[in-house]
Image (cartoon, rainbow, N blue to C red):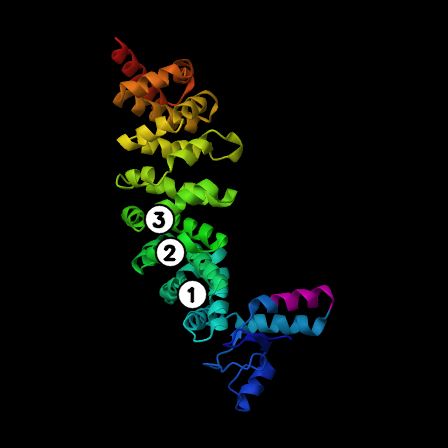
Amino acid sequence: MVDPVIVASGQTYERAYIQRWLEQGNFSCPKTRQPLPHDNLIPNYTVKALITSWCEANNVAEAAALEKNDRVTRSGETSQAFEQLITNLVTDLSSPFAGARKYAAAELRLLAKDDIQSRILVVEAGAVRPLIALLDDGDEQTQEIAVTALLNLSINDNNKAEISRAGAIDPLVRVLKAGSSAAVENAAATLFNLSVVDNNKEVIGAAGAISPLVELLASGSPGGKKDAATALFNLSTSHDNKPRMVRAGAIRPLVELASQAATGMVDKAVAILANLSTVPEGRVSIAEEGGIIALVQVVETGSPRGQENAAAALLHLCINSSKHRAMVLQEGAVPPLHALSLAGTPRGKDKLELFTRSCHLKQN
């Protein structure tokens, strides 16, 4: 091969030979025998690059020269050809052939992985709705590819709103509840990206995302736990989501993570606990699940950010309940908090001053 192209079935052929096949009146894929819904030939740039690399490494001058000439020929047409490639791939997302749908989703996933402009072009070409439809595809691998493509597209800020408007949240929650482990983790990461938009936080929480995110936080892989924690942190900044998270059992795994420095997730867990400590059920659950001991430990040995959030959570516990205040004092919180007040951030010092004042006022 020197000019590989992809047909509608997803198979790759040398351009000259597949063109001859089509010109002879054949309207099926030579390898799979599937009928071809269209005769568009999409350049396979990945295989092309491999061929060129091999030719250059092995001093095959003719093929290298062909590549050079082809590059010059394409220089004025690259943008238009690339946009046509994306359009064809988006069309194939709705193909009646499962292989074509999977291949198109996989190619769009790769295009959106690292390139900002590609993410914009893919969304402008109308890829979002058919990718969302593939989230309910019966094929597990196709579902994984589709959710990963949406994850890549959702990195772009403008795309976040478009993906949400297209109705992605409910299907993403269904993947989060019943998908493969890889699909679940990427669905969690996509929901995190979408939750950056303030209006989406309540929508995601109401759609039932919190319980499966808490389950992933408790029992997922290290990467899955991080995706879940990041998504839950964003959701915990919405007042209505805080009781939902407590009812879903979020406090226990958060306390466990806050107690395990080796996981590298202490700061995130404590930040979520600080948010949940602003509601009554959150404070009760933190005390019942041993969270006070974990928070005092973070004040003693945590990072500056972790210490600040741990102090904020302890402050909420002390101000709102004499019972919780007694528990905080019993765990020896005052000495490390005093030490922190001497070396902490200005914001942290303000919180610690409030904490100290609260304890003294309530004790007197």
Q: Which residues are magenta?
A: 49-59
What residue occupies the far front of the structure in this picture? 288
Q: Residue at x 52, y 69 (%)?
A: 75
Using a 10 Å C-alpha cutoff, classify the residue at mark 2 as few (fewer than 14 neighbours), some (14 to 19) or many (20 or more). some
Regarding mark 2 in the picture, which secondary structure is present there? helix
In the rendered image of this protein, does residue 135 appear above or below residue 73?
Answer: above
Q: CA distance from mark 2 to mark 1?
A: 12 Å
Q: Residue at x 42, y 55 (%)?
A: 178
Asked whether residue 53 is drawn in magenta, I would say yes
In the rendered image of this protein, does residue 14 appear above or below residue 121?
Answer: below
Using a 10 Å C-alpha cutoff, classify the residue at mark 1 as few (fewer than 14 neighbours), some (14 to 19) or many (20 or more). some
Q: Which residue is the site of mark 1?
A: 137
Q: Quadrant of the C terminus?
A: top left
Q: Earlier in the sequence, mark 2 or mark 3?
A: 2
Q: Earlier in the sequence, mark 3 or mark 1?
A: 1
Asked whether residue 211 is drawn in magenta, I would say no
On the image, the x and y values in percent for residue 92 come to 44, 72
**Label disc, if present, on residue 209 of the rendered structure:** 3
Q: Can I make out residue 77 in this image?
A: no
Using a 10 Å C-alpha cutoff, classify the residue at mark 3 as few (fewer than 14 neighbours), some (14 to 19) or many (20 or more). many
On the image, the x and y values in percent for residue 336 come to 42, 16
Q: Which residue is the site of mark 2?
A: 174
On the image, the x and y values in percent for residue 115 come to 47, 57
